[in-house]
């Protein structure tokens, strides 16, 4: 998916969520922790959000992460312009009947990805496919090798780190409530 299509999908979903919830940019900013200016730039397709910013928006507006950019399963994956050392491929787009989505995430160049808290009740499951992964939760690093997994409550800050030059892992995000989808 090219950059313009990516920006257009995120913009469209953000606008639809705000309209459905009857939210101003100011109210949306307060719910998400993302500045009103940044939200406006995203809606006008002037800026691509980072992975962390998109998670803040999706959590604050009770939407799944994939709803912003994946209409179907994304076989190509996505590199976010501001997060060039993180590649996100949607394996299973959000399904409201089971309340989860699944990604294949690749971190390169020993990258550490910081993640803000998701909605209360959100659980993440990570399984390492290749390389070694560090997951920081509850003030402690957990190190995983190929085939190992971890499950944790994602409603608090957490980090992922490529312990090796490159790490590939599957990440399942399970939500406690049905997310807004369009």
Image: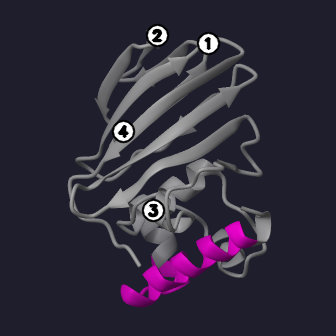
Residue 138, position as x, y percentages in the image = 35, 23
Q: Secondary structure at mark 3?
A: helix
Q: Which mark is residue 156?
A: 4
For residue 42, side relative to residue 136 (left or right): right
- Span of residues in magenta: 5-27
How far apart are the alpha carbons under marks 2 and 3?
A: 28 Å
Residue 158, position as x, y percentages in the image = 45, 32
Q: Secondary structure at mark 1?
A: loop
The residue tagged 2 is 143
Disc 2 + disc 1, Cβ < 8 Å: yes
- Residue 90 drawn above or below residue 140: below
Say which residue appears at 68% left-offset and 76% top-offset: 8
How far apart are the alpha carbons under marks 4 and 1?
A: 22 Å
Disc 3 + disc 4, Cβ < 8 Å: no
For residue 9, side relative to residue 109 (left or right): left
The residue tagged 1 is 163
Camera-nearest residue between 70 and 136: 70
């Amino acid at each position: 998916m090219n950059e313009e299509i990516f920006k257009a999908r995120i913009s469209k979903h953000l606008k639809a969520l705000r309209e459905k919830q009857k939210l101003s940019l100011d109210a949306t900013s307060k719910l998400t922790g993302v500045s009103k200016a940044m939200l406006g730039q995203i809606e006008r397709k002037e800026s691509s959000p980072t992975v962390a910013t998109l998670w803040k928006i999706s959590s604050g507006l009770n939407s799944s992460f994939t709803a912003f950019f994946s209409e179907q399963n994304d076989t190509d994956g996505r590199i976010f312009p501001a997060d060039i050392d993180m590649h996100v491929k949607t394996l299973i787009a959000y399904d409201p009947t089971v309340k989860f989505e699944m990604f294949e995430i690749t971190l390169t160049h020993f990258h550490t990805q910081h993640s803000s808290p998701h909605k209360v009740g959100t659980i993440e499951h990570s399984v390492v496919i290749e390389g070694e992964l560090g997951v920081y939760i509850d003030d402690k690093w957990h190190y995983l090798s190929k085939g190992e997994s971890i499950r944790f409550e994602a409603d608090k800050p957490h980090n992922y780190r490529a312990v090796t030059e490159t790490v590939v892992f599957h990440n399942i995000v399970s939500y406690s409530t049905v997310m807004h989808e369009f």
